[in-house]
Amino acid sequence: MLLTLGLNHNTAPIDIREKLAFSPDRLSHSLQSLNKLASIEEAAILSTCNRTEIYCDTTTQQADELITWLAAHHQLDENNIRNYLYSHTEHHSIKHMSRVACGLDSMVLGEPQILGQMKTAYQQAAEAGTLGKYLGRLFQHTFQVAKKVRTDTAIGSSPVSVAFAGVKLAQQIFGDLQDQTALLIGAGETIELSAQHLKEQGIGRLIVANRTLEKAHTIASQGNGYAIEIKDIPEHLSEADIIISSTASSLPILGKGSVETAIAKRKHKPMFMMDLAVPHDIEKEVGSLSDVYLYCVDDLKSIVDVGLQSRREAAEQAEDIIDIQVSHFQTWIRAQDASKTIYQLRTQSDKTREEVLQKAINSLNNGQPAEHVLQRLASDLTNKILHAPSSTLKQAASEGNNELLSAAQQLFNLKK
């Protein structure tokens, strides 16, 4: 039974999403803990700034055990998080995963980053050993659907993303960016996209701060920039007109004190800050400072509408593609169910055959005539194999279950 449990930017505010986010360096431990639940056979976790979702192959349709685990894992009262969560089962779960991968469930419609994040979730689950036949196949199917939607529709035609929206907001504040310096904190995909968009908009200079200088240097080289370590940010903060931060840090990178010092060095020249991280990279108190424009992920909702009309039209086409592909995956699942049943039937028949055969061999060893033994073997084998279905059919007839009787005639190719 496929089951999805999650919350996103539509169902939960950022402070709740922060509390239920999974730390990347602890994700393997979280997956293995999840996979120990009695009802869980396979599991994967997708955790981004805008959503946390758990995908499972489970023995139950109910999400209660998952909710209890999620709350306990984050040391929260499950009654305080239930109202923010949604769950999907079977074909609804299949469809939901495809919609997420295609960006149809994103804050920015059609944004491509989520597909990469889903691929990362798949890889992490594979490395943790919590993927199996069904969930692993579902992820691969989901990736194929997303590729088809990207190829066959205009869902990705407009350069609209969280990173792009942040750069457009900076332009609204500063106008021309050629005389501005941008400090990018982190080196993930969001920061790479931010650097790309800033370069396209003519940013004057880039400073990229990261724990790994090599990765930061690669991003900084896209423009007239240089790389620094995160610990050196206070020394360079006053140079930055635009700060965009997106790291996986569990604690804030920038505090109110360091920003106050930088503002004083700038002689109160305005600073634009975009905190795209969950949990926050920039202390909320920074937003109360004069000459600082601080925005977080949720603030982007008011500005992401630019360029979305063509994506909305493409989204309708994407929904049709997804519906067809969901049907294809369900056909595959039904085929697996048939294979299971056939395997069980053959295993049971093989066991019966071995029992009857061993009995016949013993009779031969005891000197009974071969012809008599063979006749007895054939009779025993027929009776044992047909006993259970014959009893079931008699019960069905007594209950007026004509549907089962008709199915048996079709199954055994019987003439009416």
Image (tube, rainbow, N blue to C red):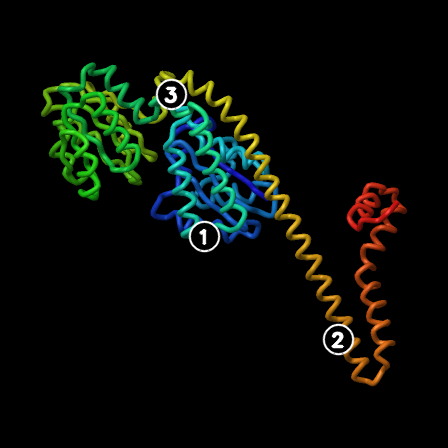
Compared across the picture, whether 394 is left or right of 31 comes to: right
Q: Are marks 3 and 1 in contact (CB under 8 Å)?
A: no
What is the C-alpha distance between the residues marked 3 and 1?
Answer: 35 Å
Residue at the farthest right position: 398
Using the image, determine if residue 171 lies above or below residue 223.
Answer: above
Residue tagged 3: 301
Residue position for label 2:
358
3 or 1: tag closer to the N-terminus: 1
Q: Nearer the viewer, mark 2 or mark 1?
A: 2
Helix, strand or loop status at disc 2: helix
- Give the residue type that dot 1 points to: Gln
* Residue nearest the viewer, comparing 370 with 245: 370
Q: Amino acid at mark 2?
A: Gln
Residue 108's x, y, as percent?
A: 39, 24
* Of residues 213 and 241, the one drawn nearer to the viewer in this rendering: 213
* Quadrant that contains the C terminus: top right
What quarter of the picture does the N terminus occupy? top right
Crowd around label 2: few <14 · some 14–19 · many ≥20 (10 Å): few
Pick whichever of labels 2 and 1 is earlier in the sequence.
1
Q: Picture quarter containing residue 385?
A: bottom right
Dividing the picture into quadrants, the one containing residue 222 is top left
**In the rendered image, is residue 256 in sight?**
yes
Residue 344 picture location, percent across and down: 68, 57
- Residue depth check, mark 2 versus mark 3: number of the one nearer the observer: 2
Marks 2 and 1, how far apart at CA: 45 Å
| Residue placed under numbered mark 1 in the picture | 32
Residue shown at 33% from the left, 23% from the top: 159
- From this view, report whether residue 126 is shown above or below residue 349: above
Q: Look at label 3 and name its amino acid.
A: Lys
